[in-house]
């Protein structure tokens, strides 16, 4: 008996007019002869010299109508070759199984054994024909017109797998030489080849990536498009052809995932340009898990937990570090440029911009979008918020530089310094609020950044408040002295008059910043008042004098508080007037 060899054939250049076996033995023989010639020496690109004739039932646009007998033919009425020709592969498989059962029953005589041996050779050839058509059906899975053939092929595979299991239970010497047929194993291996070839063909067949700037981007994009389309096709058209035990959809997902992963790993092992590095990270963390695997039609079927990572952790982290290092440098450069732009304004003789009668700086409005944009981009590309901290940490060096610039400005003698500081108090406040509200900053980092912000604000406040305290020194010295005890109303009146006069130039400070400035002035005045009281220069032994001093204390407190309340009210009305209220 001949040794059984499963047929192999180059199926990758098939088309809708794919050659089928005819409904007679000679046609099948011709196919194997052509296949053998192709494998032994012919070029893969050469066409076979003898074209196989399609069975009549497969020909289109024939002028003669089919015979009535053709229309009533069913798989039960057809022989093996006719069933194969008409893609009734499950019925053809059953016919071979029945013949196999007949041939391999216990033999009653030597003569019968000789006759059966010839039949076994014929059956072996028929199995070769069946296997070829099963391969062709599986290979053509992505042809929508092939679904009935594929469904029948799957049934045939299941039948043959069951027969393999039955033979495993019997004594080995009674096995046919072609058992086990291993249809499922061949099917799975063929699917892997199909997937790999389909991804290799993407450069020729997938459109829409032509505008991408690098060849790597175009190749990865086309592979992603092919995976997306193919998985949708599997979910909608291929999966219904299979029984549930195949779990065919997740088998395809695994195969595409592995093939895509292999290609990305090949890229990651090279020295990637930054843009290619970013593009691969986008696919790993964004496009692939979200745009492809999370498609509505796929979610009910897919088992993403079994897929694993697209790239090994070592290579993924290397790409992430390449991107993050670049982004840190880029953000530092942008922040430095924003500060330089602000400093250039300081060097001119022009006053800062006035908005609604208040000085205003755009520095914070420039800086905050830089940080936010970089943080958002980092989260989009890397898929998590953990690495956002590294971008936010660039604020530390920026704020230190900003603080240094403010200190140097205050030391200068430019006439526009007060106006510049008034404008920058707005930016300082905006930066403080931004840092306080940011959720991606750890408490430790947030505290360190806010400390720098507070130092800048205090420097600005000191610039405006120190002259006021200097002017009030004479009045401070009189507090809680015999002079104050006898002329409390006058001394406090002089103090409040000086404060009122010296804060009038602050009307062009933005209202929220002015409120903070006046609040600090109010606090410092009261602290100075209490200090003078505690120094004990006023000795009051008489109870009436003590009660009088307590009364003066309450009166002074009311008058000081009233002044700052009045200032706040006036500021509110001034701001409302500027806004047209």
Image: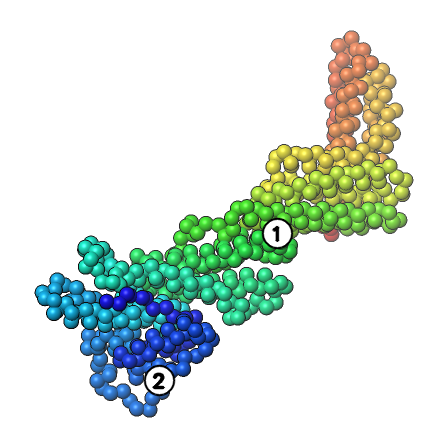
Q: What residue would you read off at disc 1?
A: 377
Q: CA distance from mark 1 to mark 2?
A: 56 Å
Q: What residue would you read off at disc 2?
A: 60
Relative vertical location of residue 295 with respect to residue 47 in this rendering, above or below = above
Percent coordinates x, y for residue 481 in the rendering: 84, 17
Which residue is rendered at x = 85% and y = 15% of the image? Answer: 482
Q: Is residue 155 visible?
A: no
The nearer-to-camera label among 1 and 2 is 2
Q: Secondary structure at mark 1?
A: helix
In the rendered image, the residue lying farthest to the left is 108
Q: Nearer the viewer, residue 203 or 554?
A: 203
What mark, if any, has residue 281 been given in the picture? none
Which residue is rendered at x = 63% and y = 33% of the image? Answer: 444
The image quadrant where one finds the N terminus is bottom left
Which residue is rendered at x = 38% and y = 60% of the image? Answer: 189
Percent coordinates x, y for residue 577 in the rendering: 75, 48
Percent coordinates x, y for residue 468 in the rendering: 84, 32
Instruction: Report if the CB atoms under discs 1 and 2 are less than 8 Å apart.
Output: no
Relative vertical location of residue 38 with respect to residue 336 in this rendering, above or below = below
Which residue is rendered at x = 21% and y = 81% of the image? Answer: 72
Q: Nearer the viewer, residue 97 or 221?
A: 97
Give the image quarter of residue 486.
top right
Relative vertical location of residue 222 with respect to residue 22 in this rendering, above or below = above
Label 1 vs 2, first from the N-terminus: 2
Give the image quarter of residue 113.
bottom left
Q: Is residue 195 visible?
A: yes
Q: Nearer the viewer, residue 160 or 523?
A: 160
In the rendered image, the residue lying farthest to the top is 541
Dot 1 crowding, Cα within 10 Å, few <14, some 14–19, many 20+: some
């Amino acid at each position: 008996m001949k040794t059984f060899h499963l047929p192999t054939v180059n199926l990758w250049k098939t088309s809708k007019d794919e050659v089928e076996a005819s409904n007679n033995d000679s046609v099948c023989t011709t196919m194997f002869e052509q296949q053998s010639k192709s494998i032994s020496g012919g070029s893969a690109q050469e066409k076979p010299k003898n074209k196989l004739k399609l069975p009549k039932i497969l020909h289109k646009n024939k002028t003669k109508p089919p015979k009535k007998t053709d229309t009533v033919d069913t798989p039960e009425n057809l022989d093996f070759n006719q069933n194969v020709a008409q893609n009734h592969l499950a019925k053809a498989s059953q016919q071979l199984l029945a013949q196999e059962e007949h041939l391999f029953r216990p033999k009653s005589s030597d003569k019968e054994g000789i006759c059966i041996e010839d039949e076994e050779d014929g059956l072996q050839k028929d199995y070769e024909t069946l296997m070829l058509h099963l391969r062709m059906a599986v290979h053509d899975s992505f042809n929508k017109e092939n679904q009935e053939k594929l469904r029948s092929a799957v049934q045939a595979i299941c039948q043959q797998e069951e027969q393999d299991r039955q033979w495993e239970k019997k004594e080995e010497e009674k096995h046919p030489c072609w058992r086990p047929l291993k249809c499922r194993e061949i099917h799975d291996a063929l699917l892997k080849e199909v997937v790999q070839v389909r991804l290799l063909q993407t450069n020729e067949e997938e459109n829409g990536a032509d505008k991408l700037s690098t060849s790597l981007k175009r190749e990865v994009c086309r592979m992603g498009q092919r995976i997306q389309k193919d998985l949708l096709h599997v979910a909608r058209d291929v999966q219904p052809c299979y029984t549930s035990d195949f779990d065919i959809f997740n088998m395809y997902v695994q195969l595409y995932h592995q093939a895509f992963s292999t290609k990305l790993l090949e890229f990651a092992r090279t020295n990637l340009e930054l843009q290619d590095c970013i593009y691969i990270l986008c696919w790993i963390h964004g496009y692939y898990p979200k745009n492809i695997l999370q498609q509505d039609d796929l979610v009910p079927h897919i088992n993403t937990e079994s897929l694993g990572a697209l790239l090994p952790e070592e290579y993924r982290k290397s790409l992430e570090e390449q991107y993050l290092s670049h982004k840190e440098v880029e953000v530092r450069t942008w922040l430095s440029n924003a500060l330089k732009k602000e400093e250039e304004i300081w060097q001119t003789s022009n006053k800062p911009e006035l908005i609604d009668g208040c000085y205003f700086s755009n520095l914070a409005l420039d800086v905050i979008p830089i940080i936010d944009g970089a943080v958002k981009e980092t989260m989009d590309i890397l898929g998590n918020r953990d690495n956002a901290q590294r971008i936010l940490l660039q604020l530390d060096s920026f704020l230190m530089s900003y603080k240094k610039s403010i200190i140097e400005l205050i030391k200068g003698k430019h006439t526009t310094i007060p106006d510049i500081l008034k404008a920058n108090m707005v930016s300082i406040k905006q930066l403080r609020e931004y840092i306080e509200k940011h959720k991606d900053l750890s408490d430790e980092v947030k505290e360190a950044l806010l400390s720098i912000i507070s130092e800048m604000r205090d420097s600005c406040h000191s610039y405006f408040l120190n002259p006021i305290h200097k002017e009030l020194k004479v009045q401070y010295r009189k507090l809680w002295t015999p002079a104050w005890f006898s002329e409390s109303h006058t001394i406090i009146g002089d103090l409040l008059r000086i404060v009122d006069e010296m804060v009038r130039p602050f009307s062009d400070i933005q209202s929220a910043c002015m409120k903070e400035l006046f609040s600090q002035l109010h606090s410092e005045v009261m602290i100075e008042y209490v200090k003078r009281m505690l120094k004990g220069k006023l000795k009051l032994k008489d109870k009436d004098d003590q009660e009088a001093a307590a009364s003066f204390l309450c009166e002074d407190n009311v008058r000081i508080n009233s002044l700052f309340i009045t200032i706040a009210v006036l500021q509110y009305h001034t701001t409302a007037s500027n806004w047209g209220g």
